[in-house]
Amino acid sequence: KVIMVFIFFVSSCFAIRAHDRPKFNWSGDRFVPVKIKVENGMVRLAGGNQQLTFKGELFRLDAAGKLKTEWTKSEDDFTTLYLTAKSEKETRLNHVIWFAGAWEKGVERVVHSTKLMDNVLFIRKKGISFFLSLDFPYSRIDSTGIQYPASVLLGEGQTYQPHSLSIGACKLSGEMVGEFDRAEIEAVSTYIERRFPARFERPMVLSAGITNRMTDVREGRIFYSMYDNPTVSLSPELVAEDLHLNAELGIEYYQVFEGVFDWPDGEQTGRNMDSLQRIAKSLGVRMGDYVVPQGLYCPHYNFTQRKLNRPDWKIREPGGGLAHRECLAVDEYVDMMTNRLVEHNKKYGLQIICLDFLNIKPCYANDHHHPPGDTYQQIKGLVKMMSALNETDENFLVWSNSGNWLELMPKLIWYNPNVYLTDPHVRQYAPHLNILKNLGDGRREQMVSVHNRYFVPYRAFTNYEYYIAPNSRLADPRVFEYSFLQGLAVTPNLGLGEIRSFLDRVSSKDNARMKKFIRHWLDFIRDNFDVWKHTSQLGDAPGTGAAEVYGHIKKDRGFLCFVNQNAFPVHKELVLGGTIGLSEGNAFLLSEIYPESGPIIEQPVPFARRGDTIQFTLAPYQVRFVRVEPYTNQSPPAVYGASPLRIDKSGDGYYITLKIPQGRQKQIALVLPDGERVREVTAAHHSLVPMFTFPVHATLLQVQENQAFLSVQGPREEAPTTLTRWRVGKDSSYRQFPVAQHEGFLGAYIHNAFSEDYEVVLKVDVERTNASRTTKRLYPPAYRQPSVALAELPPKAGTVTYQTEFILPFIERYGLDRDEQQDAIIEFGFSDPGKAVITAAKLNGKDVPVGLYTNSKNRAHKTHYLELKGQVAPGKVTLEIEVTYQDTAAPKKWH
């Protein structure tokens, strides 16, 4: 399929701890009210204590004959201007121009544009940005005004309503993302959401019946097996399986192939569709269609090699040459396509259509009844088709993908309310051993980049998961939860591609766990859509070193979603209040809902207040969801930082049973009933067999009345994960440098080192006090970021030796008795895969082979790894690698 190509922004914050954003209040409305006053060839806009003056005509109509005009306005979130024009006799209206004149001097003007059109005019003045936008997905904005080529013939006495124009304003945040201030991006995105009523007030959850692994069209034939590939004509039984699975998981929409224009026959395929629709309706699944708006046929399913042999419908290049796509300004073509689609979808009760392969470009045909070089009339034809489809059913979903749909954004969202960004596509490089994770990180980066570049609301994106890579070096089940949730952190909408074939190839235990997981989170997002439809980017843009945070906050409650795609921990500071979107409330409880549950340890106990700075920590390769809600008194004893299995009262205190990963040091907080104070805490590993009992210990860190912070050390050694402590050169000392501070070396990560959870029982001895309810809060022990010392840089080319060591606490005999998917693997990261090559590696002084995992979607993306199976025994392991840097470019500067 066609892959969308567009500008994207790379985060400027590649750091262990993200740079703080300017403290802008995001809790208020996105807009400041705008008033408009028109008099004597002058227009004045007032908003946010600023006034903007325009000299000229509010509107100008370029027509051959005289038109009677009238304008009106509405004032709500923004001011919208409406215009009507009535002809006295037959005439052609060529152009409609709003604000035909000149703006006052000394203001800053910036135009948001795509390759096909101009979208929004921003005018900045002393901390306020006014924005003006035609309420249609096309306009041209230049020194003559905001205009479009109406090119409409009006009969005598006919009334015409030009596209309206909306005017808004916002306070500038001071944070620039490319050419635009963050507040401008969010204001226009909100304008897109509010200008017309949202078509759907629920998450869009979809699947599609295509198996991308099996599709290849070349030499005029279809070179793929229909194995596992559900289609209406050739494999309806697989479509039925998909429908039952969708219902089980809670997936609402299912787009099936072949599209109406690809049906090999009408009779048998129609009977199949009728049968499948009866199944779909009985299960509550909305099934739908597919079409290529310019060309009609999907290459993968055009079994009979149909072609549109109508050169008169084609776009023409300057000079008269034919383009390969149809011109959507040709009424005959658009009407034929629209009527066929509407008739077909009504006949079979279909409620979704996937639109693919769009390639609008200026058309210079002289017989298409549009001006030379037109794109406006083509977009108008596309909107006409979408509007007709939307009118077939209140639940009908127009769902576009691929092509240059983004060049029509963001205002195409009004007719196309959900956007599937791209087919499986690897964008930025990041070291990885699993394509499922790699594609997920790429889609998240796309959503953020497209939002920032094209102002598309986050609620309009589908995070479309592709389960296409069963041959990743790291097994899919290892990253399934991460990949599933990383997209939901950004958008409430989810698509699951090839989910049936994915579940078929995992173990029965994984199958049951994954189905339960999917159903839980789809229900959760539906239950919390009122806040999840509001997304704010509170951290870094996705990328190496980024500390990402996405907020879904409304008034005094919501969720914070953290994503760390890196092989090392990241940290992020957030201030509770308007900077994260809280507009109400003073006391809050922050509770983790994934991966653990319960009040978080980073907040003061028993609650956090507005204005508190919370220092969050995120483990490598992790998604973390935290609920923010108004604080209400909890029933003590309460535990923060862990979800206790049991709390039992004893004569002189409590027994608190926790599960702790082996070797981990876990910090928790306790809030006891009034009048009780922690005197002493001891810990024991709960086991019935003495020989399997390991020492654990607990340490009191702080005590204040009925509140306490303590640290619990889990039994045995901790299984290693991230490796950030290295020697550079054989004679140097160990230093911490996990973030590309040494020629782009990102350290290493150990996957699948054996670890298990242990039950630990805390014995909390308490003493009685005379203290009444305390109003003081106890703050967590101060977080100290690990010091990161810059090692001396080696020559910019040549070979460098890196050394580290770790403890590997295996309990298995490590040979060929483990499933390959359970192998312990060391993954090495470099910021530039073309620059560094690991030429040698040693484990405990013994040479070991270095593996190279090549990404099948982009073979230039490679990741080095070592297998530990059969190479080492339990205990201390020393690792040494030799890295040869192959060019002389200066190392990338990292913050």
Image: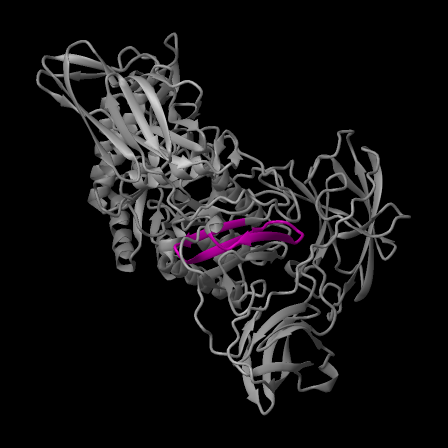
Left or right: residue 673 compared with residue 473: left
- The front one of 234 and 699 is 699
Using the rendered image of the protein, determine whether residue 437 is visible from the camera's viewpoint.
yes
| For residue 285, above or below residue 211 | below
Percent x, y of residue 726? 80, 51
Which residue is pictured at 80% across the width and 61% down the height? 872
- The front one of 428 and 148 is 148
Q: Residue furthest top?
A: 319
| For residue 245, above or below residue 349 | below
Q: Main secondary structure of the magenta part?
A: strand
Task: Classify the position of the C terminus by image quarter.
Answer: top right
- Bounds of the magenta segment: 549-577
Which quadrant would residue 861 be assigned to in this image? top right
Percent x, y of residue 251? 37, 55
Q: Residue furthest bottom?
A: 651
Left or right: residue 439 compared with residue 816: left
Q: Is residue 220 magenta?
A: no
